[in-house]
Amino acid sequence: MTMSIAHLTRRFGATEVLRGIDLAVDKGELVALLGPSGSGKTTLLKIIAGLDWPDAGALTVDGEDWLAKRAQDRRIGFVFQHYALFPHMKVRDNIAFGLTVLPKAERPAPKQIAARVGELLHFLQIAPLGDRYPAELSGGQRQRVALGRALAVDPRILLLDEPFGALDAQVRRDLRRWLRGVHDAAGTTTIFVTHDQEEAFELADRVVVMGAGRIEQIGRPDEIYDHPATPFVARFLGLTVELPVTLRAGRAEAPGLDPSALPRRAMADGPATLFLRPTEITPVPDTTGPWRVAEAVSTGALLRLGLEGPADCRIEVEVPRRAGRGLTEGQTVRLRPEAGQIFPRQSNSDGASAPAAKPLSSVKESSL
């Protein structure tokens, strides 16, 4: 089973929600659609499910035109964030529902349905819950039932829309590890939507980062984390420190910056922006350094430093508390980035260079 999406667009009034989506998904893959609210990921999922239609573009599965098929003819399994279980039905009846409403010619015999439900109850590790009602289950148990109902029809593609968004953090961590195991055992092609990068990186074979209706980057989790392709992806993945630099012979240069740990970049000389994570910067005490420690706050494991530097730049750096014992307020330092990404300097619409460094308060908010 190979799914192919080409030049897909969708508008709601004057708003372009999808702006030319191109994506291929192979059989057995687990793909995450990752992005902030409003990036178009749920709309794309609904189009794949047949719950919405694009204004232009193509969607094919094994060469079949799925845009010509109704939702009920696509054999899709869909799991919603808020379970959407039938409250008046027991767990086993919820799981069986998709099989019982198939056309008569395709509907399994009652004994076959009961056997399939029993198999899924054991497979999903909820066998003792078969005769309970949804109201008698925890959130994690309800989500397992929802997944069982989706798997019962042996879907060609399993779609999950923020499947763990309604659960607390610990249950979410447990369930996503469990879901990866279910996916591997079942061999179902799975596409899920999330705004949680940790969730996407832990679960997915490939991650599709979306922003403002476009695909910004596609790749394996480590590729995207280490090598964001655009400033949007860099910011979304936590590279919230932005320093104005000048690129010369592939090296970033700026007052008080030691770029020796950064690889050379195959980019033209000129103004650029160095994107860094607060945890990937080492402040080195230096009596002649142009950066000053304006604030030092311990969070237990980390020491959070607010630094002020040239051209009124204000950034935040995080270091292990024990490693930062010698760093105190008022001390001057230079910066040694351990990893980072460089992009040509962006400009505002009036042609002026956009400021790269953020106010300290903005950096704090974006790191929460």
Image (cartoon, rainbow, N blue to C red):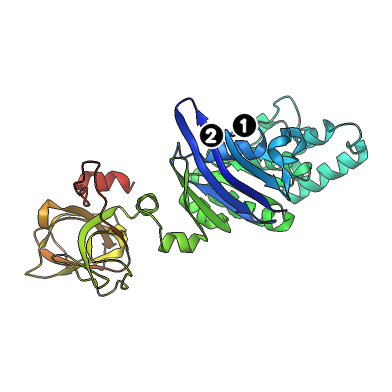
Local secondary structure at mark 2:
strand
Residue marked by disc 2: 10
- Answer yes or no: is residue 254 visible: yes
Closer to us: 253 or 205: 253
Residue 91 location (% of width, % of height): 75, 35
Local secondary structure at mark 1:
loop
Of badges 1 and 2, nearer the viewer stands: 2
Closer to us: 146 or 53: 53
The relative height of residue 207 versus residue 211 in the rendered view (above or below) is below
Q: Amino acid at mark 1?
A: Asp
Q: At 71% from the left edge and 47% from the top edge, which residue is drawn?
A: 61
Contact flag, marks 1 and 2 (Cβ < 8 Å): yes
* Residue sitting farthest toward the left: 288
Residue 306 location (% of width, % of height): 19, 54
Residue marked by disc 1: 52
Residue 142 location (% of width, % of height): 65, 37
The relative height of residue 122 versus residue 266 in the rendered view (above or below) is above
Q: Amino acid at mark 2?
A: Arg
